[in-house]
Amino acid sequence: MLEIASKVHDESRQGEAFAPNAVADKQFKKHFYIESYGCAMNFSDSEIVASILNTEGFGATKNSDEADLIFLNTCSIRDKAEQTIRKRLTEFRVIKKQKPGLLIGVLGCMAERLKAKLLEEEKLVDLVIGPDAYRSLPSLIQEAETGQKAVNVLLSRDETYGDISPIRLNSNGVTAFVSITRGCNNMCSFCVVPFTRGRERSRDAYSIVAEAQDLFNNGYKEVTLLGQNVDSYIWMDEQNDKSITFAKLLEMVALISPELRVRFSTSHPKDITDEVLFTMSKYENICKCIHLPVQSGNTRVLELMNRTYTREWYISKYNRIKEIMPDCSVTSDMIAGFCTETEEEHNDTLSLMELCRFDYSYMYYYSERPGTLAERKLEDDVPELVKKRRLQEIIDVQSRLSRENNQLDLGKTYKVLIEAESKKDSSDWKGRNTHNKVLVFPKGEHQFKAGDYVMVKVNKVTQGTLLGEIVSTQNS
Ligand code: SAM
Ligand code: SF4
Ligand code: F3S
C-alpha cells in the first residue's frame, strides 16, 4: 500500500462489496453482487448501476455465492490496478464452474480500455460495459442470458445519468458522493482517463441540488461533489438564460442547509478560481480542504506531463488559497519517476512538498498506460528501482509533514461530524473535521449518534488520526 491515507479519491480502495442488505432480499427474483475498484467516481457509478438494476428487478447482495450476476467495476489508472482485476476474475472462475448460469460482467474503465478484447482474454466474462453505457445493462443482461457475449462500450458526449437516483450502497447514512461531471477534457500525458471516460460533460445543476436535498432529507449530513476536474464544471441554465459555474453550484448546494457539509474533489490547479475560493470562505459548511494534485514540482516535467502550469504557478495558486483561507487544508497527488525525470527534478518535487506542507498526498510511481500521449511520445526510461526509491523518498517526506501538521492540531477544538463507531473500539466515535482529518474520541456518557456534530478537543495525534475528547455539542 503506497498511499498513506484513505480518503476520497483513493485509488487504493479496492473490491469493497457493496450491497444495502447483508442477505438477499426475497422481493427480488434475481440478485447481483458488485465490487468497485478505483476512484470515488467509480464507486459513485456503482450506485447508479445498482439503481438501474433495481428497477429491472435485481436486488443487491453482499454475498457473491447467492448472486446470479457478478460485476466488477474496474479501474485502469495503473497497470497494478488492472492486474488486481485479472486476479479477481481468476477467483470467480471457480464460482462459475460450480454455477454455470452465473453471469460475470466487467464494468468501468478497464471495460472501456480493452473493449471486446477483454472477452477474448478472459473467457469467463459474459458482459463488457463501459462507463457511459449503463442504461443498456438490462438489455445486455437479457442478451447474455441467451448465451451470447454482450458488449457496449460506446462513449457519450451527453450522458450524465442526471435523472437516476443512485442507490446508496454500503452507506454510513451520513456521507455520500454526488457526481457533477463525467469525463475529462485535459490530456495529461500520463493519464488513461480521457480515453476511458470520454469528453467532459456537466450535469444539470438542479438535478445535483435535488439529489443533495434528498440526501439531506434522508438524514445525510455531508455530500462530496465529484468530478475529475470539478472547477471546470459549467452548465447552461437555458430557462433562466445563464450559465452556472462551479462556484455558483457550490453555493447552491451549501444553501440547502448550514447543517449539510459540502466537499468536492478533484481540483485542477489551472482551473480553480478566486470565485470558488471566496465562495468557500463565505460558507462555514463548505469544508476548508482542497485536493490540488501537483504531480511534480519541476516545470520541465510538468510540461512533459501536459499539466499546463509551472512550479511557480502552482505555488502562487497555493499561496492564493492560504491568503483567502489561511486555515484551509491542501492535499495533493505526486507521481515519481515520470519519463526522463532527473534526480534534480525529483528533488524539486520534494522541495515543493516542503514548501506547501500538504496535509496528506496520494503518491505513486509512474506506470505507463497504453494509448496515452506519454506512451506514444516519451520514453519510460527511469528504471523501476529508481522510481520506487524516489517514491519512497516522497512518502517519507509526506509522512513527516502529515505528522508535523497533526502535531499543530494538539490542543485545538474542531467541529466534528460523527460518521460511525470506531472499528477498533465500539466505545469510540469516528468522524472528520473540516480539513477532512479523521478524529477518534470516546463516546463517554453523551447520547450522540452518527450524523451529529460535536466539538472535539485534540489531545493526542498519530500520523493519520487525531485523538480527542468531546468538549461541547453543536446539536444541543
Ligand atoms: N483528475 C485528477 C487530477 O487531475 O489530479 C485525478 C486523476 S487520477 C484518477 C488520480 C491520480 O492518479 C492522478 O492525480 C495521478 O497522480 C495518478 N496517476 C494517473 N495516471 C497515472 C500513471 N500513469 N501512473 C501513475 N500514477 C498515475
Ligand atoms: Fe487524468 Fe489529467 Fe484528467 Fe486528471 S485532469 S483525469 S490526471 S487527464
Ligand atoms: Fe477512476 Fe480508475 Fe477510471 S481512477 S476514472 S476508475 S481509470
Image (cartoon, rainbow, N blue to C red):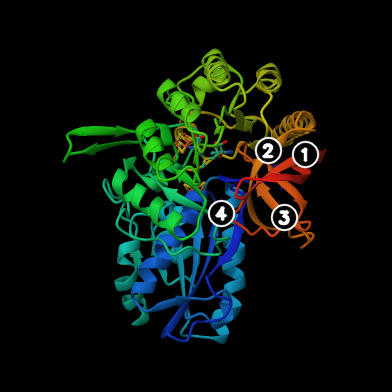
Residue 77: percent from the left, percent from the top?
53, 45
Res 199 visible: no
Circle 2 residue: 414
* Secondary element at image label 4: helix
Mark 1 or mark 4, which has the lower sequence index?
A: 4
* Vertical position of residue 248 compared to residue 176: above or below: above
User: Identity of the amino acid at label 4?
Assistant: Glu
User: Identity of the amino acid at label 3?
Assistant: Trp
Disc 3 crowd, CA 10 A, few/some/many (<14, 14-19, 20+) = many
Q: Nearer the viewer, residue 460 or 243?
A: 460
The structure residue drawn at horizontal position 48% and vertical position 19%, both measured from the top left corner, is 309
The structure residue drawn at horizontal position 56% and vertical position 45%, both measured from the top left corner, is 9
Q: Residue furthest right?
A: 460
Relative to 337, 428 lies left or right: right
Relative to 273, 17 lies left or right: right
Question: Which of the numbered marks, if any, corresponds to residue 82?
Answer: 4
Circle 1 residue: 458
Q: Answer yes or no: do the residues labelled 2 and 3 have beta carbons within 8 Å?
A: no
